[in-house]
Amino acid sequence: MKGKRIQFIDTGRSFGGAERVTLALASAFLAEGADVECLVDRHAFPFVEELSGAGIPARAVDETDRPGRIGALGAEVRRFDPHIVHLQRTWPLSDRYASIAVRRASKARFVATEHVRFEGCGLRDRLAKGILCRFDHRLVAVSRAVGESLERFWKVPASKIAVIPNGIDVGRFRRGGGEGRRGGLFPERCTFRIGAVGRLE
């Protein structure tokens, strides 16, 4: 990816799963020699701190998913002049105006990661999604269920969908000296344990 300019758009205000995906991808592409930039919500302070700690340039933008912000967001895209724009789509119709802004402002390849399976909507939203997906060169589904929903319910062409589960750097969770230890949270007689890692919100 050396010499490529990749612009990420992530307008969430928290630091959850979608933001971690952006951080992981931006870090990996930066390490490969790409020129990387993230457009983030100006109120997403924890996310900005994480990006800064990883040496990833971040520019604060106002809420993008409004018709009145299309021009301003398009100006940010033109300024960076990316080869690829990557957007995190945490809801089937989220960031619809950001998608329009990118396509108006640039001929960059446009990739969106779809994070949820949601089918509780009517015909109007389904039609809007069909129009929205025309702007996408590629849709990344984070699970097979999301990919199947995009194809079956939202009528996205299968040729546009790639299923890529979110990656986890398990090295971040390794601790020395714990080999063979059964754990201090449960008594030794407890032979069956269930563990879950997630964000409580």
Image (cartoon, rainbow, N blue to C red):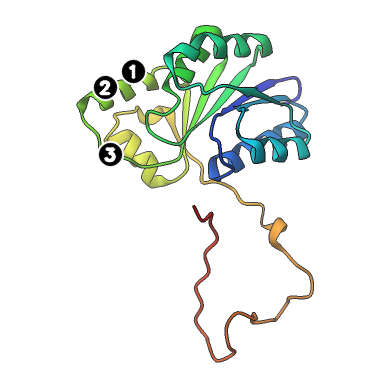
Classify residue 104 as left or right of residue 128. Answer: right
Disc 3 + disc 1, Cβ < 8 Å: no
Q: N-terminal of the two: label 3 or label 1?
A: 3
Disc 2 + disc 3, Cβ < 8 Å: no
**Residue matched to label 2:** 127
Classify residue 60 as left or right of residue 165. Answer: right
**Tag 2: Cα neighbours inside 10 Å, few (<14), some, or many (≥20)?**
few
Considering the numbered disc 3 on the image, is that residue within a helix, a strand or a loop? loop
Which amino acid, mark 1? Ile
16 w.r.t. 128: above or below: below
* Residue 173 x/y as whole percent: 69, 61
57 w.r.t. 183: above or below: above
Which amino acid, mark 2? Leu
Residue at image point 26% right, 22% down: 127
**Tag 1: Cα neighbours inside 10 Å, few (<14), some, or many (≥20)?**
few
Tell which of 180 and 93 is nearer to you: 93
Residue extending furthest bottom?
189
Residue at image point 33% right, 18% down: 131
**Residue matched to label 3:** 119
Decide if residue 107 is in sight here: no
Considering the numbered disc 1 on the image, is that residue within a helix, a strand or a loop? helix
**Residue matched to label 1:** 131
Which amino acid, mark 3? Glu
Label 2 and label 3: CA atoms lie apart by 13 Å
**Tag 3: Cα neighbours inside 10 Å, few (<14), some, or many (≥20)?**
few
Label 3 and label 1: CA atoms lie apart by 17 Å
27 w.r.t. 195: above or below: above
Residue at image point 39% right, 18% down: 134
Rendering quarter of residue 184: bottom right
Tell which of 181 and 65 is nearer to you: 65
